[in-house]
Amino acid sequence: MTCRTGLLPEDCAADHWCAALGGERTADGNGQWRANCPYPGCGAERALEWDMPGKSVRWKTFCGYHDKEALRPVLAERLKGCLPRRRSDRTPIDHDDLIALALSGAPPMTMKLAMLQMGGMRTAEAFDKLGVRRENRARVIAGRTGGASKRIQNRRSQEGLIHLTGSATLIPPGGIL
Ligand SMILES: [Zn+2]
Ligand SMILES: [Zn+2]
């Protein structure tokens, strides 16, 4: 469900998409809509097609000049929140990973970073959101922030043992190293 005003996908496809793109139902009655290519200055006739086979609108392009990668930002701009996210933008969160993270004893900032990464953010983006300065990032990744003891800080050779993503095997500072 990705409509900005919470319309059912079918209604979003018919109302929002058609209004934004000048779409029309295809004549053969198979539940599809067509519009001219929305790429600025293109307008290839009836080159954009969409339908609603499941829970969200599916679309493809027949324009000879503009593939999906080229059209995605154009559609995102025109549709203002009614464009479904690419499925690959977000991988499902593994419940066991989430539980392991919560119980890991990682410092708060390290835990927040791991949560944002699980949510699909890239590491640099997550750090920006968290306001972590560059010089501190390696320590956050290594789980050595906030009151880490001298003993821990001296053990620089251990850096890199903590993996934040994937199996979420987080080892707390001073833990089972
Ligand atoms: Zn909509
Ligand atoms: Zn085009």
Image (tube, helix red, strand yellow):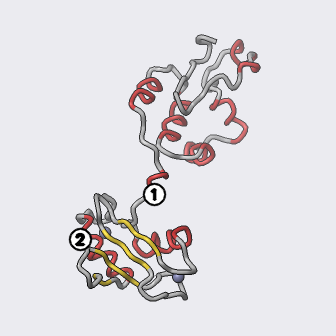
Q: Residue at x 42, y 38 (%)?
A: 93
**To which residue does mark 2 refer?**
11
In the image, 50 versus 28, the foreground residue is 28
55 left or right of 63 in image: left
In the image, 151 versus 167, the foreground residue is 167
For numbered disc 2, what is the local secondary structure? helix
Assign the N terminus to one quadrant of the image: bottom left
Please provide percent x and percent y for residue 158: 71, 19
Q: Residue at x 36, y 67 (%)?
A: 82
The amino acid type of the residue labelled 1 equals Arg
Q: Are the residues flagged by discs 1 and 2 in contact, CB closer than 8 Å?
A: no
Q: CA distance from mark 1 to mark 2?
A: 20 Å
Q: Residue at x 39, y 76 (%)?
A: 49
Please provide percent x and percent y for residue 41: 55, 88
Does mark 1's beta carbon lie closer than 8 Å to ligand 1?
no
Crowding around mark 2 (Cα neighbors within 10 Å: few <14, some 14 to 19, many 20+) is some
Residue 94, placed above or below residue 32: above
Does mark 2's beta carbon lie closer than 8 Å to ligand 1?
yes
Q: Residue at x 56, y 72 (%)?
A: 70
Residue 86: assigned label = 1
For numbered disc 1, what is the local secondary structure? loop
Q: Earlier in the sequence, mark 1 or mark 2?
A: 2
47 left or right of 19 in image: right
The amino acid type of the residue labelled 2 equals Asp
Crowding around mark 1 (Cα neighbors within 10 Å: few <14, some 14 to 19, many 20+) is few
Assign the C terminus to one quadrant of the image: top right
22 left or right of 103 in image: left
